Amino acid sequence: MASNISTREIHYTAKDGSSLIGYFAAPISETPVAGVIVAPEWWGRTEYTEQRARELAEQGYAALAIDMYGDKKVTDAASQANEWMTQTFQDPDTIVTRANAGLETLAAQPEVNPEQLAAIGFCYGGKVVLDLARSGAALKAVASFHGTLTPKAPAESGKIQAEILVLHGELDSMVTLDDVAQFKTEMDNAKVNYDVIVLGNAKHGFSNPLADERAKTNGVDLGYNASAEQQSLTAMYALLERNLS
């Protein structure tokens, strides 16, 4: 269902005062369409995140690649990425505050149906969208790709509105299978509609074709897996179709 799309940058401000710059992509449509925020890996709002937003637009969804660090800062150095990410952990509200600013900005665009919203995230962005869902945000679907699963605070029964999908690499050394088991317990206790798909022979970062290069440059345990990428994207689009159609 490839569509002609339009793209633009959108400047917005979070309630913590941070100046953020999102990348918006939407199909050319006479009627508003469902909207999806795309939360980035710890590298920042990179071209990879923008590519995922464009792909969503080509499939008929409006998408906003959100900025979590401010001024669309990006890096390919793990030390810098870790520093920026850690800064967003210092105040326990920062992640949800900035993600919610992105969600509100997406919902306010004329191309978007504000009643049909979802969120996807990669790596650090997986934590971002899961914490946003845990906060009770008006989301119908949330997908985490090789995301951090540890919550700011455990999900409360009745608070998560979205169907949750976690896509996890079997060989992920940064987010372990024990972490996955704890996440499942958290979701079960909160009676959340969720699914976890563990992808065989896949490491952290499996969806990003640049993962091997970043692993070599930074000495971190990342790895791209084309099969896992395709399986995970297929599952994500099925999730969106179930909940946003």
Image (tube, rainbow, N blue to C red):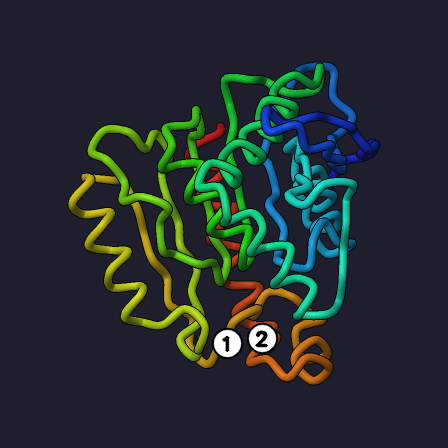
Instruction: For marks 2 and 1, give the one nearer the viewer.
Output: 1
Q: Which mark is residue 15?
A: none
Q: Nearer the viewer, residue 34 or 91?
A: 91
Picture quadrant of residue 230: bottom right
Residue 163 screen position, x and y as percent: 36, 38
Q: Amino acid at mark 2?
A: Asn
Quadrant including the N terminus: top right
Which residue is located at x 78 percent, y 26 percent?
28
Q: Is residue 34 visible?
A: no
The answer to the question of whether label 2 and label 1 lie on touching residues, with beta carbons closer than 8 A, is yes
* Residue that badge 2 annotates: 225
User: How many discs appear?
Assistant: 2
Which residue is located at x 64 percent, y 43 percent?
68
* Residue that badge 1 annotates: 203
The first of marks 2 and 1 along the sequence is 1
Residue 32 screen position, x and y as percent: 65, 17
| SS state under label 1 | loop
Which residue is located at x 45 percent, y 72 percent?
174
Q: Amino acid at mark 1?
A: Lys
156 lies above or below 88: above
